[in-house]
Amino acid sequence: MPIPQTLDRTLTALADPTRRAILQRLSSGEARVTEVARPFGMSLNAVSKHILVLERAKLVKRRRVGREHFLSYRSEPLDAAAKWIAETRNFWGTRLDALEQLLREEDAAKR
Amino acid sequence: MPIPQTLDRTLTALADPTRRAILQRLSSGEARVTEVARPFGMSLNAVSKHILVLERAKLVKRRRVGREHFLSYRSEPLDAAAKWIAETRNFWGTRLDALEQLLREEDAAKR
DNA sequence: CATACATTCAACCAAACGGTTGAATATATT
DNA sequence: AATATATTCAACCGTTTGGTTGAATGTATG
C-alpha cells in the first residue's frame, strides 16, 4: 500500500511551521536555496534539510542550473491530502457517540 | 498565534498510520482503551501513548467511568485542517513556475 | 589561476518519537 | 480481604528530528 506512506510524508512535511513558510514562499514563484533560507533565523544547512523533507514529500521540485538550485512548489501532494481528508471526513462524518445519537432521536420524536 | 500550533498537532497526529487506524475505529463509535488496542500488534502502553497524542490534538475525547476510559472521536480538528488546506490551496493554487508560465503564454499567443 | 559563491556532506548534539517492560493506582468482583 | 481488571506512570532503548559547525564540492568570476 503505497498511498498511506505518501500521505505520511505529506502530513509530516506540512506539520512544521518552517516548512509551511518555505512552501508559502515558493508558492509565489521559484527561488534559490539561499533566497529561501534568508528570512529564517537558522543556518542555511538547517533550511537545506527542511527542503530535503519537502522534496521527499514531492512538495518541492529542484531544478539545477550551474551552481544554483531553483526550487518550485508542486501542488499534487497537497491536492491528494485534501482529497484524503475530504473522503475521510465524509466517511467518519461528524459521527455522534451513542448517547448523543439517542438524544437526537428523542428530540426528533418530540416534534 | 495559537492556530498554527493547533494545526501542527493535528497534522502530526494524523501523519501516523496507527493513529489514523485508531481514529477510524473510533469514528464508528466509542470504545475503551483496551478495545482500541486489541487489533494492533503492539503493547497496550504503546497504544495508550498514541491515544495521548490524539488527545493532545483534541481528535479524541476521554470519558472516565470507573476504571474504564471511553474514547470518542472529535471531528473539529479534522474540520479545521480541511479548512486550512482548502484555503491554502486556494491561495497557493497550482502556481506555475516562470518557465511553465512562459510556455503557456506562448501557447495562448499561437491561437 | 585564485578567489568568491551556492550548495551539500559529515559529524555531532539534544530532544522527541515509538516502542518495550515492570511497577503503581484505582476500581470491580469474589 | 483477596484477587482480577483497566489503565497509567516510570524508566529505558534505539531511531529520527531539527539544529549546529566545519569541511568538501562544484561553478562562476577577477
Image (cartoon, coloured by chain):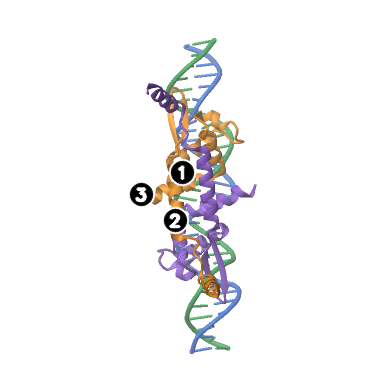
Chain colours: A orange, B purple, C blue, D green
Q: Quadrant of residue A62?
A: top left
Q: Nearer the viewer, mark 3 or mark 1?
A: 1
Q: Residues within 10 Å of mark 2 (few under 14, many from 20)?
A: some
For the residues marked 2 and 3, what is the alpha-carbon distance in whole angstroms?
Answer: 17 Å
| Chain under callout 2 | A
To which residue does mark 1 refer?
Answer: A78
To which residue does mark 3 refer?
Answer: A2
| A39 lies left or right of D28 | right
To which residue does mark 2 refer?
Answer: A88
A2 versus B46 height, above or below: above
Question: Sequence-wise, which precedes: disc 3 or disc 1?
Answer: 3
Instruction: Please state which of residues D3 and A46 is positioned toward the viewer in this rendering.
Output: A46
B55 versus A53 height, above or below: below
Q: Nearer the viewer, mark 2 or mark 3?
A: 2
| Chain under callout 3 | A
- Dot 1: what SS? helix
Q: Position of residue B43 (x, y in %)?
A: 45, 65
